Image (cartoon, rainbow, N blue to C red):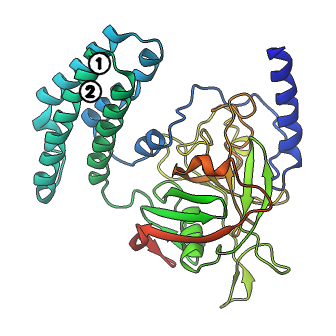
Amino acid sequence: MASARVLAVVAWALALCLSLPLSPRPASAALPQGNAVKDPAAILRNALPVDAPRLQELQHRLEDTSTDLRAKRWSALNSTVQRSQSLLSSRRSEILARFAPEDTQRATALLDRLETELQTLAASAQAQDRDAFLASRREALATIGTAEAMLVGPFPFAIPSEFDALPRLLGRATVEIETSKGPVTAVVDGYNAPLTAGAFVDLVQKRFYDGLPFTRAEDFYVLQTGDPEGPADGYVDPATKELRRVPLEIMVPGEAAPFYNQTFEDLGRYKAAAVLPFATVGTLGWAHSDKQLDDGSSQFFFFLYEAELTPAGLNLVDGRYAAFGYVVDGAEVLEELGVDDRILRARVVEGAENLQPHA
């Protein structure tokens, strides 16, 4: 029964993908493989352009406790936390040395806080208290993420000059989206998708999305909006009277800059991964037509991850569409939204200073 359901769901997924207005191309090779990270906070931490090996080692150790926690391997969890405490203690000076002198005081306070949080985490592991362990781990990882964000230096790459007229987000921004079913908060990542995130934040600042309906709602797949009233299917620049077009933009681990207007299929990289994958409920994706990769203008979608239909690392969206952020609060609201609902208002609550209207 279960296998029959899986086959039916997969067949429906393939048919749905090929009929979406997002219009992914039919796959001509094996889909990318991998056991993808599905926690939006972890994805965002991993996507930071930083070189902080000891902090990142601590981060990954704590993130990797999920398997042992599910299996209730408390002895292994105790050992991991103790080794993490030892790493922080023995490498503290090395970690601090990576911060700019003016940030040393704040970084020291963060490491002090992390030390206390690891002590609390150790106590919850000793007590075999799953809920307390999860809460303590969440706090410790948030502290590590804050410290890692302080280590981001100058914007890491040059955006091609052919896109000089487009807005760009040179960093991150937090956007609150009030919908007819409740609020959603998303973090938009300009480090890895500066033009896509920039176009989105620019339109939020212009109040473009306020009042717009959701135009497509496919259970377990996508929830799409951003189509304005009238004949245009995107944002028409009042200065040029032309539709603003945003290129397909995908960053791949190990590359110095994103690929523009090329899918993984075009690149022959069928097993590639994206720094910002479609791997969790509430991934923000930029829509384009089935005819061109660079005609996305204002329409975006929330990816509705479902393990059997769109498994992380095995979906038909990665490498064909640009992900540019993640819902970090209110993901449950997405399950309630449909084509009878709309965005009431969207506002940038943090990071607006990272938006530049053009080069």
Residue 236 appears at what percent x and percent y?
72, 82
Mark 1 and mark 2: span between their CA atoms? 6 Å
Residue 229, placed above or below residue 73: below
Q: Is residue 41 left or right of residue 62?
A: right
The image quarter in which residue 68 lies: top left
Residue 240 numbered mark, or none: none
In the picture, the quarter occupied by the N terminus is top right
Return the residue nearer the eye: 310 or 51.
Answer: 310
- Secondary element under disc 1, as helix, strand or loop, is helix
Q: Amino acid at mark 1?
A: Ala
Residue 48, placed above or below residue 129: below
User: What residue did someone put label 1 on?
Assistant: 125
The image quarter in which residue 314 lies: top right
For this orientation, the residue located farthest to the bottom is 239
Q: Residues within 10 Å of mark 1 (few under 14, many from 20)?
A: many
What is the count of numbered marks?
Answer: 2
Q: Is residue 261 left or right of residue 352?
A: right
Residue 335, placed above or below residue 166: above
Return the residue nearer the eye: 53 or 355.
Answer: 355
Residue 133 appears at what percent x and percent y?
34, 26
User: Would you say residue 282 is visible in this rendering?
Assistant: no
Q: Is residue 340 left or right of residue 75?
A: right
Residue 171 appears at what percent x and percent y?
42, 61
User: Would you say residue 154 is visible in this rendering?
Assistant: yes
Q: Amino acid at mark 2?
A: Leu
Residue, x 29% and y 49% (percent of image)? 146
Residue, x 41% and y 24% (percent of image)? 64
C-beta proximity under 8 Å, tags 1 and 2? yes
User: What residue did someone put label 2 on?
Assistant: 121
Residue 315 appears at what percent x and percent y?
71, 35
Residue, x 69% and y 76% (percent of image)? 244
Return the residue nearer the eye: 37 or 186.
Answer: 186
